[in-house]
Image (spheres, rainbow, N blue to C red):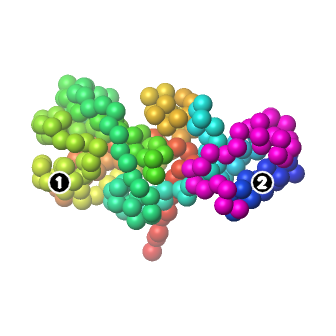
Amino acid sequence: MSSAYDDIKAHIQHLISDGRLGANHKLPSERELVEQLPVTRITLRDGLTRLEGEGLVYRQNRRGWFVAPNRFVMKPAQKVNFNRMAGEQGFQPGTEVLHLRRQAVRRDIYTAFEAGKNSRYFELRRVRSLDNRAVMVEDSYMPVERYTGLNDFDLSESVTEILQQHYGVEVASEHCNIQIANLERVHAEPLGIHAGTLGLKIVRLRYGPNGQLIDYNIEHWLPHAIEMEVATR
């Protein structure tokens, strides 16, 4: 497999360096690649899967293989603003609201808010994209009583700015828990991948200056669309 894999990788890199393919461009079909190399279809798929792990290509269900852009660099030690960080890295960010609904939630969420189990929360689910490629599904939970009228705002815009400008809420600190997890269907489908695919799960709790929890966020990332950068002194 090693020599065939090297051939597959070299061929894809040549298509990129030759200017025929750029970031988010679709690769030739598997049939065409098998004819160009040549390798078996099974060997090709194994090679492309390994290249996806290296961040060179990515696959979308029923669409095929694409050239991967640079990974989004997350700096979890800093307060995170997705739109600002994306712009600073040369990406065009985008947001699609899937739903906003009121509901009672899991014990871990109402416990984090130091509230009773009958407390009600907004559940906001959004798809975040970079250069029109969906890379993350975000579930945000916010107390209904604290954020009355939240559904009146355009939630495809920055929620951080909405909370600051209309509710007087300022993010002073964040706590992140980062783990590898299998993506459930509701999170995998908007990202164009199969349910059960390994992804990066980031549970992000944001606090105000007084230490009060502002919102509870769970991010479900495409596995090869993000990398972490942490600086210490």
As helix, strand or loop, the secondary structure at mark 1 comes to: helix
Q: Please tell me whether residue 41 belongs to the stretch shown in magenta.
A: yes
Numbered range of the magenta stretch: 18-43
Q: Disc 2 or 1, which lies upstream in sequence?
A: 2
Q: Magenta span has 24?
A: yes
Instruction: Residue at 80% x, 35% y: name it.
Output: 41
Q: Which residue was labeled with disc 1?
A: 164
Asked if residue 107 can be seen in this view, the reply is: no
Residue 47: image quadrant is top right
The residue located at (63%, 37%) in the rendering is 64
Q: Which amino acid does the dot numbered 2 rest on?
A: His
- Tag 1: amino acid: Gln
Disc number placed over residue 11 in the picture, else none: 2
Pick the residue in front: 117 or 191: 191
Would residue 220 appear left or right of 82 to someone viewing this image?
right
Q: Position of residue 38 (x, y in %)?
A: 86, 43
Which sits in the foreground, 59 or 75? 59
Q: Give the quarter of the figure containing the C terminus.
A: bottom left
